[in-house]
Image (cartoon, helix red, strand yellow):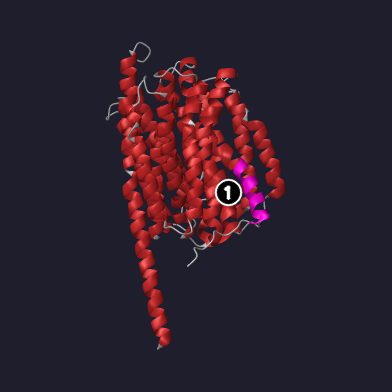
Amino acid sequence: MTAPQPPRLDAPLRRLLGVIVIGIFLSVLDMTVVNVAIDRLGVRLHSSVASTQWVITSYLLALAAAVPLTGWASRRFSARRAYLACLLVFTMGSALCGLAWSLGSLVAFRAIQGIGGGALFPIAQTIIAREAGPRRMARTLSIIGSVSVLAPVLGPIMGGFILDHFSWRWIFLVNLPIGVVGLVLAWLRLPADQPEATGGPDVVGLIAMGLGLPAFTYATAELGEGAPIASFRGGGLLLISLILIAFFIWHALRVKGPLLDLRLFANRTYATATAAMFMFSAAVFGPYLVMPLFFQQVQHASAEGAGALFAAQAIGAAASIRLGGILGHRVQAGVLASCGAVIMIAFTLVLPSFDQMTSHIEAVVVLVGRGFGIGLAMIPLIAAALSELERRQLPDGSAQSNVVQRIGSSLATTAIAVLLSNQLGSGTQASPAHVAMAYDRTLWAAVGLAVLVLPFALALLGCQRRTAARAAWELRRARTASDR
């Protein structure tokens, strides 16, 4: 029997994808474009790695806070208008970041940038899922996924080039012309859709989550840096954050039209795939912070060189993400995700052995292999979650899966930054051997995060097989009944 061919993408859908990927590229690029700048920003602003990393974490937390509103905004104002508004906010936030005068102002403006950028990805997924339909979802998501995998890896290259040749401010100002082009094309090309009659947003849920998640991240960072458990900024803030998060969950399960429809997690496949995405995001983003710094501080590469080395992941990811899109309609997502997780773990295990003598060729080979595993696992996880939902559930389902991913990446970034800062100690007077050892220990934590992905991928595989077996049994029973 001839294997079924993947459904083709018609010209209108390809043009729509071309417009959508501009906003996705900008949003995801800015998760990592400043990673190579952490070392230089820390020197300029007289801050430690743990403090300066808030330039990254504030963006990721703002992403997580903004994403839950996308389901409501897409219904209330239409997906097209919501997308245009978010891209405009992101572009304006980029301009403000380029004008920042201190670490505090830069962190605040990065949060504004993240509010706009956070909503772009789930709204784009909703638009594409509606236009593509279930049969073409794997292929269209593979194209979006190519951007969401490549952009974070290309970010350090762009950031390194700008740092070595221009002011750090241009890391953000370069978004302005791209954002304007994206706005014009989106205005002209995005399909018009009608807003739905709906009430206001879940303000109570928004406040609980908007305060609880940043407070939890900040409290864990403070405890990691040595804040007393009995202090307010340590244990006190942690307790408050846990109460707010617990209240949010209680509230979301009891009200109509919650900020996040947690009832969707009753779908076992969706819940398992989303949990796997949480761990996957944590495993992927930890080294995004550490590796550019390693190449600069241990191997004494320039910012541009560090970005180019780390971008080797893009080569492997670009190859495997297309493979995942092609195989997505033939092979169960759990199989691809499990294979990708194993490959990612195998190459991540090599990272702690890197030192000042590690050749660039070896580093490139390892990062290409790691990227291959990342690309192979990512798209099947997203497709597995969204393909289980009804059309009306797509806005909320897409928003929730994105929230979970951003929470995973922000917590991992903060934890890795605090661990690295603690290992480096007072910093500038440390010997090269001490600095190398600090990175070695930190990268073992990244290995631990990678290993934790595999159980969730295997759980998804088991869940899908049980679902398939149940569907086959029901089909046989229906045929037997009809024969009678």
Q: Secondary structure at mark 1?
A: helix
* Placement of the C terminus among the 4 image quadrants: bottom left
Number of residues whose C-alpha sits closer than 10 Å to that of mark 1, classed few (under 14), some (14–19) or many (20 or more): many
In this rendering, the answer to whether 464 lies above or below 37 is below
Query: Horizontally, is 256 left or right of 10 in the view?
Result: left
Q: Position of residue 70 (x, y in %)?
A: 54, 49
Task: Name the residue at the bottom extreme.
Answer: 484
Residue at 37% over, 23% down: 358
Q: Is residue 12 magenta?
A: yes
Q: Which residue is mark 1?
A: 124
The stretch of residues the image draws in magenta is 10-22
Mark 1 belongs to which amino acid?
A: Ala
In this rendering, the answer to whether 4 lies above or below 443 is below
Q: Quadrant for residue 39, please give it.
A: top left
Q: Position of residue 148 (x, y in %)?
A: 52, 42
Residue 71 in sight from this viewpoint: no
Q: Quadrant for residue 278, please give it.
A: top left
Q: Main secondary structure of the magenta part?
A: helix
